[in-house]
Every structure is written in C-alpha cells, then in structure tokens.
Amino acid sequence: MTGAYDEMYGVPATPQQAQQPQPAAQPQVAAAQQAAQAAPQPVVQQPAPQAAPQQPIQPFGQEGGLPAYHVHHSYIWLGTIRSMLAVLFVLLVTSFSSVAGVIDEIGYSGLGMLSVVLGGVGVLFLVVVGLVVLVHVLAYRRLYFTLGPNEFSLYSGIITKKRVHVSYDRVQSVDARASLVQRVFGVCNVFIDTAGGASNKAVIVPYVTKVQATWLTSELYARKRQALQPQAAAAQPVPGQAQPAATGNLLDYGKEAWDEVGGIFAGAPMQEAAPSFEYGLSNKQLFLSGLSNNTSFALFVLGFLLALAQIAGFVFEAFPDESNSVMGSLTVPAPDLLTGAGLVASIVGIVVLLLVVWVVSAASQCLNFGGFRARRVGDRVEVERGLLQHSRQSISIQRVQAVVVKQSVIRRLIGYCEVSLDKIDAESGDDSGQKNGLNTSGVIVHPFCKLADVPGILQGLVPEYAGIPQDRTPVAPVALRRGLIRRCIIQGGGFWMAVCVAVLQIMMNVLFAPGSDLTVNSAAEDALLLGWANVVCYALYAVAAAIFALDIVSAVKWARESGFAVNRQFMKVVNGGLSREERSFPRNKIQYGSTRTNPFQRMAKVATICARTAAGVGGTTIVLWDVTQEDAERWLDWVRPRS
C-alpha cells in the first residue's frame, strides 16, 4: 500500500524503522496503538514551561503571581499605520467637496484661502494621528497574556477591561497567520480556537514574533496534554513510521529565503520538535493544483456566455434592417470580410482575456500553496503554506472531526483528489485578508494528490484513522430512478433553464406577434427582432440540453457509487456523481444520528440517513439519500449509545 507512496516521495527506511514490524494494510486503531507502545521510539521533548532560558519571550512583569507577556511593540506603529490609511482616505473624500466649494466660490485667485483650508485639513490629520498613536500605546500597555497552571489568559482594554480565560483542555487548534506586511516585519497573529459552539470566536493574540508564535503554540499543546493526561504528560503518541520531508518544488526556495530572512523582528529561530512524518508538494502537484482550481469552470461558463453574446451582437449588425422575417434575414447576403474579421477578433480577445485571468488565478493559487508542508508532530497535525501571506495551522488529533477526500470534475478525470481534515471552526476577526478562507474546506493536508496515495498519507499523518471501513453498503436500487428525478428535474439546472427560456420565448412571441397592439415598432422590425429572439432561444435550448445530459450522467454515477460503511469505531459516507466526496469520521464524533422519510420515500421503502458532527461553524450534517429502510434501521442501531 505504501510502496508507491514511499517511492514517489523518496522515503528511505531508517535503522530504527527497519527493526520495527511493518503495520498491516488496514490495522485496527487499538492494535496499532499497542504495537506503537511496544516499539521503542524516541520521545520528542517539548520546551519546559518553567525553563526561562528556553523561552524566546521574556515576561515584563507579574499578573496574579504569574509571568505576564506583552505582544510585540509593532502592534503600536503597524496598527497605527493601518488605521491611519483608513482615516486618510476618509479625510480626502470628505475634504474634496470642501476644497471644490472654495475654488468654485473664490476662484483660483484665492490661493491663500485655499492654503488655509488645506492647512486645516493637515492639522486635523496630525491631531487624529496623535490620538490614534495614543490609543494604540495605551492599548499596548494593557494587552498581554499569562500562562497559568490550568488556563491561558489574555488581558486587553483601555477603559473597559477584558479578560479571556481559556482552559488548556478546551484548546481546539492553534493557528498563526501573517499578511505580507507582517511577514516583512517578522510578526503574525495567533488564533486559539476553543470550539465554543455555533458562535465560536477564536481568541486572537495579535502581533507576536514568529518565534514567539512557535513557542506559544508548543506551550499550549504541551499544557493541553498535561491537562488531559496528568499521569503521562511527557508521553507522546507515536503516529507511525518516521518519514523525511518530500522533494519540494520551485516555490520552496522562496520559502527558504523567507525563513532565512525571517523578518525584521522575527527573532532567532527556535528549535522545534522533530516531526515523525512530513511531506510537501512536487512541482507537478503545485502546478496542477493551481490550474484545476474552482475558477476554471466559472471562467469556462463566463467565456461561453460572452462569446454567445458577441456573436449575437455581430449578427444583428451584419444583417440589414429591411428583413421582414427570419427566413428573409437568413437569406440575405453574408456579412463582409471586415465584419467577419471583427467577430473573430472579438471572440479571440475574449478567449485571451479569460486565459489571462485563468493564469493569474492559477498563479495566485500556487502562491497560496507555496512552501506547503504537512507534518505530524507528537499528537497534533501541522500544515504550513503561503509564500506571501503565510499561515501555519495546527490541530490536536483528538479534535479532528473527519477525514474528507474530495474530487472535482476535473480531478476525477485525471485521478487526483484533495485531502482535508474537518475541525470545529471559529469566527475570527482577523483583518489580514485571509479571515475564514483557510477554514472553508477544513485543514487541507494535501491540495492535489493521486487517489492511490491517500492511504499512505493518512497512514503517516493520522494513523488513528487506519481502521476506516473499506466495504460499502450501496443505496437502494430504486435510488437510480429517484436520483434522476431529483437531480435532473427538481434540482436540474438544464431542465429549469429550458423552462425559463420557453417562458421567455412565449412572452416574446406574444409581444412581437404581427398585428399585436403591445408593440410600437413596425412590422418589419418586429419580425426581425422576433426571428433573432427565437434563434437565441434555440441556442439556449441547446445549452440546456447539454446541462440536462450532464445531470443525467451525474445522477447515474451517484446511484452507482454512493453508499455508507460502518464498523465498531468508524463510519464512512460516499456521495458520488460528476464530483465525488468521501467523508470518514469516528463513531464517537457523531453528536446525533437520525433518519427521515418523505411520502415518496415511504412509497419506495427508502430513507435518508443524517449524521451530525461538530465540524465547521455550528456543526455539519452528513446526508445520504435513499438507502433501504432495513439498512437505515441497522444504521440507527449502530449509532445508538452503547452501555
């Protein structure tokens, strides 16, 4: 199973690994943990919280008998610059009308009065700058955090004081994100996600240096392990075979350059715990992940519509207004070569423009995944990416809600997929431009890999999920007929597009019919307009027919590929079609399970199963339509709490 994966990533076996027994293809989690405990493994030591010399951030004082740590002083002036840009824009917009009014009233000869007005604006700007700086200085003095025996505390506020306390055992994940400006200065924002329900908001520690962020992340996870396992705080779960990093890509050189420069205030690099499993992206994977992003299909649709509109516009200009009917307009002499050349040039221009946008989007996607690294460090998974705007996500393995393997239409055609880990997301107030963009698909642990390589990736990154069932209980045979009705008619884009075009065509024929009292145009103009309206409608019918055919293919593939599988510890749900999603999650992560049936499902003796997890903001419901009633009842028995 892992042979092709190891060969692809150039993984040699260490002497320690050679002495250890190799795990089975799909071991159970309990057996894997017993084997890991029996095998001698080096223990990765975390920085001791009490060892002051190892701490890259020194306390400035005491708070409640605990060392208190300030954020970096760049919070004052970088925050001031960001705020002043917004203030300057507001002043320019509001003062423009005043300056224009003075010029209109006194003319350009009254430059003295104009200078007074501009000077007043400048003085006002300086006063605002002083106030903003003062506010940031006072806020900085009251912005600090402490690490207590049982909780992390963040103190903030000038007039209204605010204290946020986070128990270590409630830490969901710790992420670090830096905008381009922050990267230049070597600072970032740290987000501590606590999984606090549907309105969960991350605790933000702004403007800490890169080495401080690394230290704080290690401290929080070390104290979390100590809180969850007081008797074995130093024990590290062994994820599996230790693997070296994969061969990188061209953009990894940019990441290495960033790491060497670090930033103005980044600080000396901190010695981190060695990962037991790590990989990156090859040049091919990085390039294809950029080309196959979600923008591709949208650009294709946009290009088709623009080309269709351009052709229709040139056709209206090419044929004379004297045509009295559709057949007459089609039998007039063909447009001249100049008009034809203009049509071709316009279509080529549209195609070139869309290609440029596509290339820019692909380049942006590549920069977004530049320097990509996914690793297993102790009991957490870390993902690092971004050449310009950098992010480092980490999630405790106990907080992983599901493993998701997604295939878009393009990726299905070439046998590739995206692998991500679902987690409980937080609503953050980050203003770095990334916000929740990193959480829309969970934590992406591989943006573009072969489907055959997924077992090897999961074996090294999340071996706790090695017991995922591989068999599948398919949907009911009647699901094909119901899927065709649901996907092609009720939810069918092609069907409803054809209905809308038919309604529009009927309205046009009624409005511009010969002798109609609803139009003010001449009969010849009405006939010409009606003729070309029908031609456009026929073209849209063809598009609707193509979409309807794709809906049929998608429904057939859904009925053949969809299903679910369960064993004692895990559940897997597969929803197929033109795109495909496979979601696997532990049984103990299911908050509740249910089945539902509508009258038509009861007639067909099928049901819909729904499993609710805590993934995302407010939770995620995994749904599978049209399983047999017997399978649904067996699944309900499986999901019921056990004694």
Image (cartoon, rainbow, N blue to C red):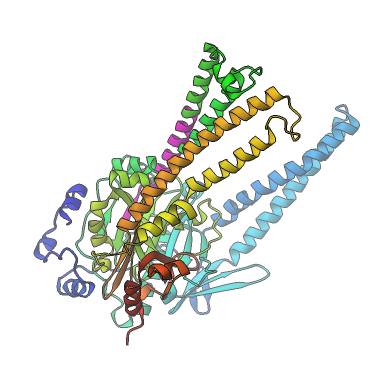
User: Is residue 191 among what the camera can see?
Assistant: yes
Identify the residue shown where x is 65% and y is 26%.
527
Looking at the image, the residue that sits furthest to the left is 19
Looking at the image, the residue that sits furthest to the bottom is 643
537 or 291, which is in the foreground? 537
187 or 323, which is in the foreground? 323
Residue 372 counted in the magenta span: yes
Q: Quadrant of residue 414?
A: top left
Q: Seen in the image, is 204 located left or right of residue 215?
A: right
Residue 256: percent from the left, percent from the top?
34, 45
215 or 344, which is in the foreground? 344
Residue 212 counted in the magenta span: no
Residue 433: percent from the left, percent from the top?
53, 50
* Image: 189 above or below 192: above
Residue 320: percent from the left, percent from the top?
63, 17
From the image, which quarter does the N terminus lie in? Answer: bottom left
* Image: 542 above or below 499: above
Identify the residue shown where x is 74% and y is 32%.
519
The number of numbered badges drawn on the structure is: 0
415 or 526, which is in the foreground? 526
From the image, which quarter does the C terminus lie in? Answer: bottom left
Q: Seen in the image, is 238 located left or right of residue 617?
A: left
Residue 486: percent from the left, percent from the top?
44, 57
Q: Quadrant of residue 403?
A: bottom left
Q: Which residues are magenta?
A: 352-374
Q: Main secondary structure of the magenta part?
A: helix
Identify the residue shown where x is 57% and y is 15%.
332
Q: Quadrant of residue 297?
A: top left
* Image: 446 above or below 106: below
Q: Seen in the image, is 578 located left or right of residue 126?
A: left
